[in-house]
Image (spheres, rainbow, N blue to C red):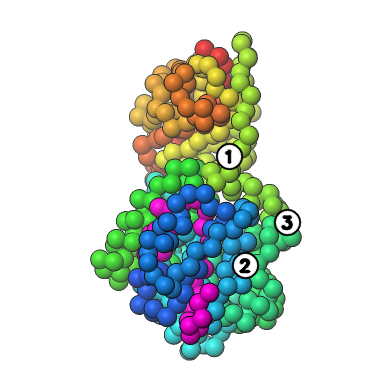
């Protein structure tokens, strides 16, 4: 237990089995121009080498605490962090997000100037790499926070007193909405005064927007961002703001708003996000039986930014457009214990010849494919998959991934005034034993 003088800031980092991202996030904390902080890294029952990453920092301000059981989201680790925090102010950082060097300094200046109890730092959110999407949060119209204006925990700094008055974080079983939004609601309802630092100092690479982020554990985006911040933070921020403005001009700037009458409960939303980002594996599907053909029609399921919403053509065929990402996947509840043939119904292509330059993979293994044009409109895309030499994990499910070289707005192609970024329109997928 640290018995020295209380720091100005207690920084809480909740983490779960992603040590390579954690190392980069912690580096961005240690790079702060404001150095009067303690850093509490709370593992959500981690089983990887995250503890060794923390120990390797060899900094007396940094503490590691690993929970005995997994809470499934940040609310549990954040509450443990609050119980251990000694600072006047508490800041949070997601283990796959980064801070600019002035993040804590700007917060301290804002607390002194506004006497607020809760601050939002400006945050730039990055869509999946091929989507071109961006979002900005942490700014309030007329400088007045309402629950509509959500900002992520990596942007949140509050006084210790405000957290105690709000009753801390609560889990999805009792939360009215997502646990991070619920905590903002509780802070507001307890009478806390909100303000914005007015500076963008948070860079968020949302795992909930990246399919299987926790399985792939790719930190290339974070590493490039941290390197650029260290080389020249002001220049990097200007470049990224320019990219965000371009995204706005191309219908790629997202509006982040959270209405309180959300249709999904917090528990449902948490489970959906866990499945999509790959932090929790779903049960294996049953294998195909001989002579069995399974057809999977389009469903209006959560898919990040890989698919647009469900549509229907004049003949009654349901389909979804790929976009704005160049890569879109569907995970089908089928176990792969034998070779299979896959047929994909391509209803439309946004540009002639796009299918020619598109490709297929199954469980991240590239597969050869051919397509034919049946008598009616559209195409049938055929692929043969032999999983004989794949690992057991790769055979537990069937994830079909379609990659297109580009997406386009119908507006730019002179088709109509549709401003969505589209690739191929996909109807059903059939799977049968080879």
Task: State how far apart marks 3 and 1 are (Cα).
Answer: 20 Å
Q: In the displayed structure, does residue 118 sit left or right of residue 269?
A: left
Q: Mark 1 points at which residue?
A: 281
Q: Which of marks 3 and 1 is nearer the N terminus?
A: 3
Checking the image for residue 79, the label placed there is 2
Q: How far apart are marks 2 and 3 (CA)?
A: 15 Å
* Residue pointed to by mark 3: 173
Q: What residue sits 54% from the left and 63% below the top?
A: 65
422 sits left or right of 170 in the view: left
**Which of pointers 2 and 3 indicates the residue nearer the eye?**
2
* Disc on the earlier residue, 2 or 3: 2
Measure the alpha-carbon separation of dots 2 and 1.
Answer: 26 Å
In the rendered view, tell whether residue 327 sits above or below residue 118.
above
Vertical order, 244 against 301 (above or below) = below
From which residue to which does the magenta span run? 1-28
- Of tags 2 and 1, the one toward the viewer is 2
Q: Which residue is drawn at 48% across and 85% down?
A: 5
In the foreground, 352 or 336? 336
Estimate how packed mark 2 is, as few (under 14), some (14 to 19) or many (20 or more) residues with alpha carbons within 10 Å.
Answer: some
């Amino acid at each position: 237990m640290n018995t020295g003088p209380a720091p100005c800031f207690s920084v809480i980092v909740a983490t779960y089995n992603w040590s390579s991202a954690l190392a980069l996030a912690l580096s961005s904390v240690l790079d702060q121009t404001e150095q009067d902080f303690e850093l509490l890294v709370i593992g959500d029952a981690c089983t990887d080498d995250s503890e060794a990453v923390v120990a390797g920092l060899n900094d007396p301000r940094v503490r590691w605490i690993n929970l005995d059981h997994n809470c499934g989201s940040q609310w549990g680790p954040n509450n443990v962090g609050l119980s251990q925090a000694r600072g006047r102010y508490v800041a949070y950082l997601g283990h796959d997000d980064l801070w600019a060097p002035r993040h804590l300094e700007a917060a301290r200046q804002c607390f002194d100037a506004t006497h607020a109890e809760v601050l939002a730092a400006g945050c730039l959110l990055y869509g999946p790499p091929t989507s071109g999407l961006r979002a900005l949060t942490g700014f309030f119209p007329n400088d007045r926070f309402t629950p509509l204006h959500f900002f992520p925990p990596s942007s949140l700094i509050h006084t210790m007193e405000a957290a105690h008055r709000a009753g801390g974080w609560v889990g999805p079983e009792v939360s009215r909405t997502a646990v991070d939004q619920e905590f903002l609601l509780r802070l507001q309802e307890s009478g806390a005064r909100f303000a914005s630092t007015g500076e963008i100092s948070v860079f968020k690479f949302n795992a909930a927007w990246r399919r299987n982020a926790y399985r792939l554990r790719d930190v290339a985006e974070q590493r490039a961002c941290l390197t650029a911040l260290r080389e020249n933070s002001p220049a990097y921020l200007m470049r990224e703001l320019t990219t965000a403005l371009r995204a706005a001009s191309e219908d790629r700037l997202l509006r982040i708003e959270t209405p309180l009458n959300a249709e999904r409960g917090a528990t449902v939303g948490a489970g959906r996000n866990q499945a999509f980002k790959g932090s929790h594996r779903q049960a294996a599907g049953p294998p195909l039986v001989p002579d069995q053909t399974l057809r999977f029609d389009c469903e209006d399921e959560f898919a990040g930014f890989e698919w647009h919403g469900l549509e229907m053509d004049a003949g009654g065929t349901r389909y979804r457009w790929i976009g704005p990402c160049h890569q879109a996947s569907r995970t089908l509840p089928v176990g792969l214990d034998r070779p299979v043939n896959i047929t994909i119904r391509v209803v439309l292509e946004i540009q002639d010849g796009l299918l020619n330059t598109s490709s297929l993979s199954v469980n991240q293994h590239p597969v050869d494919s051919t397509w034919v044009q049946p008598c009616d409109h559209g195409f049938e895309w055929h692929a043969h998959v032999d999983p004989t030499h794949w690992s057991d994990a790769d055979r537990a499910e069937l994830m079909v991934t379609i990659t297109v070289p580009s997406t386009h707005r119908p507006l730019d192609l002179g088709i109509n005034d549709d401003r969505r970024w589209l690739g191929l329109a996909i109807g059903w997928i059939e799977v049968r034993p080879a």
